[in-house]
Amino acid sequence: MAVELSQSETKGRTTGRAFKSPKQLKLGKAKYDWFWFLFPAFLLVFVFYFLPVIITFFISATNMSSSTGFKNWDWVGLGNYQKITQLPETLGHLWLTVRFVVITLVFFNVGMALVVALLTTHIPRQVGFLFRALWLLPRITPVVVYVMMWQFLAADVPYGVLNQIFFQPLGLKTQYWLPAAPFLFIVLVNGFIGASFGMILFSSAIEAIPKDIMTASLVDGSTKWQRVKYIILPSLRWPLLFVTTYQTLSLMTSFKEILVLTDGEFNTEVWSLWAYHRALNNYWGNFQWGFGMALSAILVVIGIILGFVYMRYFKFGELVQEPKIETL
């Protein structure tokens, strides 16, 4: 073996190439194994996330529409964005979207989700599991069926559930409640769907807290509110960051429930629905793809900015840093 090795070394010197043992060759090949493992994920992210964003910004700089087709369009640069700033309805759509996202996020997608998770993890396990399963019904129900249920709730007599059960027996005025309180209904319709998402994540995170910590707090005489404030909430920073970021972006860009419920009538056309109407569905039949993409590109920029703000607020750097030895 020693003779063969020396001959190989001698051959390597004579050919001018450094000799590498089989172990070194194996390590050299394994050096790039991480790339091939991650390549399918990189490809999916690029094709379905980065490439659509590039296409969005590209089309937003053109006057592409159904009248120009895909061949006769021209570059307009920032013309679509200037048009957005000059339209009188822009501030109305923006303010409606801000109110819709903030109220739905605070009171339902994060607030109600956290409350339901806390309640269902402090009752018998089987009862809590059943209650959480019921809260998933709005999410797993088809959008059209789910929205139709809300329309029947708000409908006038003799079909409206609210009017028949509450208002008519009390002798109060009955009416079609959707036009009377449209903003409330779009918040409720989206809120009950969004609350189920955060509820599942928060419940899993709460149940993952070591039982020893909770038991020690009980021995120390802590109240339920103290356990929530000093043990549970600090342990939910990761889920809170993810749910808040994801649900903010989801509320900013989703419009299908509002589309089925009101189609933007009664002053319920949020920014994403406005972009959809301009680009793909409007009364005049001229689909303004470039203008619609400009509206969508603004949402992309706002979403990226909010993502960095959330990571800063929740101290993302501390969440991903390696644990110190004294905390282990």
Image (cartoon, rainbow, N blue to C red):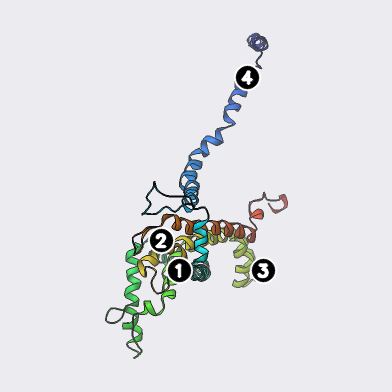
At numbered mark 2, what does the secondary structure look like: helix, strand or loop? helix
Give how far apart the Cα atoms at labels 4 and 2 are.
Answer: 65 Å
Which residue matches tag 2? 278
Mark 2 or mark 3: which comes first in sequence?
3
Which of the marked residues, 1 or 4, is nearer the chain's N terminus?
4
Q: Seen in the image, is 146 located left or right of residue 316?
A: left
Q: What residue does disc 3 label?
A: 220
For label 2, count other residues whose C-alpha is less than 10 Å away and answer few (under 14), some (14-19) or many (20+): many
Q: For numbered disc 1, what is the local secondary structure?
A: helix
Q: Earlier in the sequence, mark 3 or mark 1?
A: 1
Look at discs 4 and 3 and give the one toward the viewer: 4
Identify residue for label 1. Answer: 191
Name the element at disc 3.
loop
Q: Which quadrant holds residue 153?
A: bottom left
Q: Do the residues under discs 4 and 3 have CB atoms within 8 angstroms? A: no
Residue 123 drawn above or below residue 275: below
CB atoms of marks 1 and 2 within 8 Å: no
- Residue at 37% in and 50% down: 69
Residue 127, horizontal then vertical, whole percent:
43, 67
Q: Position of residue 182 (x, y in %)?
A: 41, 75
Residue under the point 39% across and 80% down: 180
Counting from the top left corner in percent of width and height, residue 122 is at: 52, 68
Q: Identify which residue, 51 or 313, lies in the foreground.
A: 51
Q: Secondary structure at mark 4?
A: loop
Question: Looking at the picture, which amino acid does disc 4 mark?
Answer: Ser
Q: Report the Cα–Cα distance between label 4 and label 3.
A: 62 Å
Which residue matches tag 4? 21
Mark 2–mark 3 distance (CA, rounded to whole Å): 61 Å
Instruction: Judge left or right: residue 141 versus residue 220.
Output: left
Of the pair 317 and 132, the residue shown nearer to us: 317
Residue type, numbered disc 1: Gly
Instruction: Say which amino acid is labelled 2.
Output: Arg
